[in-house]
Image: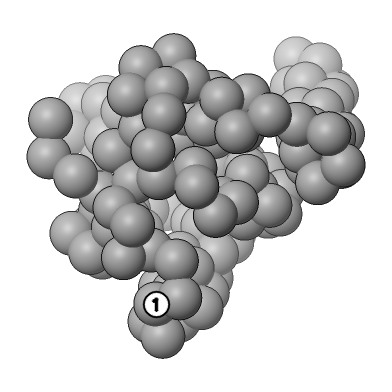
């Protein structure tokens, strides 16, 4: 099962990297919006998996799997999917990206904090300590919230 999951993560990373290369060369803004919406939905599902384990019966393997998915997406260079003009338009649904995203002096720090929190989440999850996972999950959630608060429009 672990080998299958590692293959799934590796395949996901390769697909994400291919998507970024495509986005940089010929991807339409609507495609870029759709791809990033898909990535964020995947991370949201993975966050929900971790939360269910933190709040309920803790399963180290499930937490590690979800944390690895978040880490893979966080490190996929999906910033290329945020081209100027992609704050308007529709992917699977209307984008919620605020135009303040572009040129924000805080963007690099916010993104760096998220990547660091995602990498640490995967590391902590691999250790299997439920208390440490819960603490790091809170930090990861805060790093997500920092971006949402600043750059995401409300529904």
- Residue lying at the far left in this picture: please name it: 154
From the viewer's perspective, is 92 left or right of 131?
Answer: right
60 to the left or right of 69: left
Q: Nearer the viewer, residue 24 or 19?
A: 24
Q: Is residue 8 visible?
A: yes
Give neighbour class at mark 1: few <14, some 14-19, many 20+ (Cα, 10 Å): few
| Residue 15 in which image quadrant | top right
Q: Is any part of residue 71 visible from this angle?
A: no
**Position of residue 147 measured from the top left corner of the image (x, y, whole percent):** 31, 60
Q: Which residue is mark 1?
A: 104
Q: Quadrant of the C terminus?
A: top left
Residue under the point 29% across and 38% down: 96
Residue at left offset 87%, top offset 42% = 25
Q: How many marks?
A: 1
Which of the pair 148/1 is nearer the observer?
148
Q: Nearer the viewer, residue 103 or 34?
A: 103
| Residue 86, position as x, y percentages in the image | 49, 42
Write the residue at 40% across / 45% down: 87
């Amino acid at each position: 099962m672990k080998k299958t999951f590692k293959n799934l993560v590796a395949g996901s990373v390769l697909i994400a990297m291919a998507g970024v290369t495509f986005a940089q060369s010929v991807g339409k803004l609507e495609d870029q919006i759709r791809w990033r919406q898909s990535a964020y939905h995947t991370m949201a599902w993975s966050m929900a998996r971790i939360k269910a384990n933190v709040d309920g019966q803790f399963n180290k393997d499930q937490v590690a799997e979800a944390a690895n998915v978040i880490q893979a997406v966080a490190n996929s260079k999906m910033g290329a999917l945020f081209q100027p003009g992609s704050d308007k338009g529709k992917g699977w649904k209307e984008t919620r990206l605020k135009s303040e995203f572009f040129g924000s002096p805080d963007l690099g720090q916010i993104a760096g904090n998220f990547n660091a929190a995602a990498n640490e989440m995967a590391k902590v999850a691999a250790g299997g300590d439920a208390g440490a996972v819960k603490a790091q999950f809170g930090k990861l959630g805060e790093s997500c919230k920092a971006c949402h608060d600043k750059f995401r429009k409300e529904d």
